[in-house]
């Protein structure tokens, strides 16, 4: 069937997280209506398999499939993630935390951070009352504790969110078993040829090394950096963003567990790039992302080994990449999902999310009749927009650094950023205003955490915050910090939570009266002397 027809046969090229997440979603939502799904992969071709940290949206994907969270954690050797600790990013010796969830509690008319800025401008209390003191996730992480969100909006735990760390290879195997049980057909083999239609240029079939030919209506390219279908066969151009995101190399080198399993990822800025640390139950995921223009491969590996928490497990795995994306991620009857369509470094753990949103987008726009032009155009528009917004958030981390001890960091500090990011920075520097565009991934809280964490402080705050008497504001914000701290102290240690097989009951009783969530009431306080 050609690119203009109804889709009945979907062929997924490549396994790994991208391939098997796509297969699982299609098995759940499309196969019951008669769509056939075939996945082709070769055991001889490895997957990248280093993306072991995620963001909270992964929970929605697992819930869609009906995968039990406790089973998932057990089978993937996983742990829970409350956010990312950034070390030495703003400057040497600086640490800050990008938490999942929200900061403080908004009033009816003001964002909480405007009240915090008012306190900072009045008393210069940014160190005594760090933004992280008003984050449930950050406080729990600092104590090595974990708990699930409360459904009670008056409890501090209602503001927490979480994601996972897991072994990506084990996750792919879990999804493979799930998908095959639902009827997805897996074919083992190496692709030797991609055959295109003479009439419209669509992919008609793929040929395997053993002579097997696989025909399909829609082909999903999950072949990783190789981009066998979209990049090679369709020759779709690549939009290069390396001038903004200059890191183009990575080395992954897992290490033995050392110390407790912490509920957060750590990113440490180093010469030429940054190192990651991802705690799993059976090992620690470790690696370095760096710019080959500023650091040699040998020096990067030496620095990585020197920074490991425990003994190295296995051999180093080297990756080369360019930040950016294919100009179109859906061309004719080929859709790229995952690394075959683009790559944004794992600084904020967005790789799995980009797979997930591409799958959701494709299923939402899945062709149901002849003529796919509108669906393709909208898929590409949304995909490029998502890449651009995540790109800006990643660039922020580099641009906001004031480090000048290394040529790489000097380059990042001096580079001109996209106009879309420049506008955000100007608005925030003026009076702390943050605007989230449409359904973009990163929330106002995320932008706030990174900008403040790396030392960008607004010159002013929303004037509406000045209507609140200073003493009353100080008293109620102290009560807020106290409630958050008490709630964090009552959570289970993260390792104990995991050891208990992720018991369904919350580690904190949401009805406990000593951890009520205090609201700031500007109308009441404005009437006070």
Image (cartoon, helix red, strand yellow):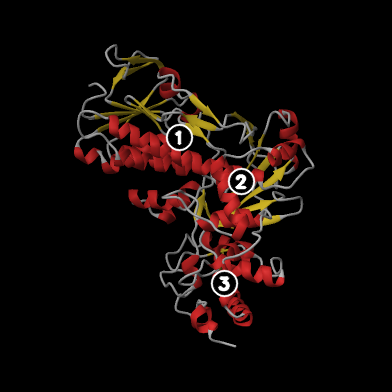
Seen from the viewer's position, the closer of residues 437 and 304 is: 437
Seen from the viewer's position, the closer of residues 56 and 2 is: 2
The crowding category of the residue bearing disc 1, from other C-alpha atoms within 10 Å (few below 14, some 14 to 19, many at least 20), is: many
**Whole-Å distance between the Cαs marked 1 and 3?**
44 Å
- For mark 2, give the secondary structure: helix
On screen, residue 88 above or below 499: above
Q: How many marks?
A: 3
The residue carrying mark 2 is 396
Viewer-nearest of labels 3 and 2? 3
Relative to 171, 300 lies left or right: right
Residue at the image point whose x is 67% and y is 68% from the top? 120
For the C terminus, which image quadrant? bottom right
The crowding category of the residue bearing disc 3, from other C-alpha atoms within 10 Å (few below 14, some 14 to 19, many at least 20), is: many
Q: Position of residue 206 (x, y in %)?
A: 34, 18
Picture quadrant of residue 189: top left
Extreme-right residue of the structure? 405
The residue carrying mark 1 is 338
């Amino acid at each position: 069937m050609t690119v203009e027809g109804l889709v009945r046969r979907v062929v997924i090229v490549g396994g790994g997280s991208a391939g098997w997440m796509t297969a699982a979603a299609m098995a759940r939502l499309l196969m019951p209506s008669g769509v056939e799904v075939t996945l082709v992969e070769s055991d001889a071709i490895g997957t990248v398999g280093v993306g072991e940290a995620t963001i909270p949206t992964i929970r929605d994907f697992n819930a869609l499939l009906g995968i039990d969270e406790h089973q998932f954690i057990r089978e993937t050797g996983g742990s829970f993630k409350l956010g990312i600790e950034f070390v030495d990013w703003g400057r040497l010796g600086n640490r800050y935390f990008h938490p999942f969830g929200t900061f403080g509690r908004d009033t009816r008319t003001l964002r909480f951070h405007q009240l915090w800025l008012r306190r900072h401008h009045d008393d210069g209390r940014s160190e005594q009352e760090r933004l992280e003191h008003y984050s449930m996730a950050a406080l729990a992480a600092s104590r090595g504790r974990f708990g699930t969100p409360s459904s009670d909006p008056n409890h501090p735990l209602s503001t927490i969110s979480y994601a996972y760390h897991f072994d990506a290879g084990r996750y792919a195997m879990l999804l493979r078993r799930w998908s095959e049980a639902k009827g997805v057909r897996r074919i083992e083999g190496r692709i030797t040829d991609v055959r295109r239609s003479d009439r419209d240029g669509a992919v008609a079939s793929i040929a395997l090394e053993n002579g097997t030919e696989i025909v399909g209506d829609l082909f999903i390219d999950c072949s990783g950096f190789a981009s066998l279908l979209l990049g090679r066969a369709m020759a779709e151009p690549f939009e290069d963003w390396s001038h903004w995101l200059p890191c183009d190399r990575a080395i992954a080198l897992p290490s033995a567990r050392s110390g407790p399993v912490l509920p957060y990822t750590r990113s440490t800025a180093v010469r030429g790039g940054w190192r990651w640390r991802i705690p799993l139950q059976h090992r620690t995921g470790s690696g370095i992302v760096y710019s080959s223009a500023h650091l040699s491969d040998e020096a990067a590996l030496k620095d990585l080994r020197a920074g490991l928490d425990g003994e190295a497990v296995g051999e180093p795995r080297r990756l080369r990449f360019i930040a950016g994306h294919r100009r179109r991620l859906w061309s004719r009857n080929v859709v790229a999902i995952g690394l075959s369509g683009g790559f944004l470094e794992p600084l904020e753990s967005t790789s799995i999310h980009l797979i997930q949103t591409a799958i959701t987008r494709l299923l939402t726009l899945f062709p149901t009749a002849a003529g796919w032009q509108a669906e393709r155009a909208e898929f590409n528009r949304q995909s490029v927009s998502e890449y651009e917004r995540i790109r800006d958030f990643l660039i922020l981390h580099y641009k906001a650094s004031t480090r000048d001890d290394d040529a790489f960091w000097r380059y990042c500090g001096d580079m001109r950023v996209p106009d879309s990011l420049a506008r955000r920075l100007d608005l925030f520097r003026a009076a702390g205003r943050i605007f989230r565009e449409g359904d973009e991934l990163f929330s106002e809280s995320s932008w706030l955490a990174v900008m403040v964490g790396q030392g960008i402080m607004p010159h002013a705050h929303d004037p509406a915050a000045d209507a609140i008497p200073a003493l009353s504001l100080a008293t109620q914000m102290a009560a807020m910090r106290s409630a958050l701290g008490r709630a964090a102290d009552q959570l289970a240690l993260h390792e104990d939570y995991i050891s208990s097989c992720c018991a369904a009951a919350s580690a904190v009783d949401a009805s406990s009266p000593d951890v009520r969530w205090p609201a700031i009431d500007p109308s009441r306080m404005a009437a006070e002397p």
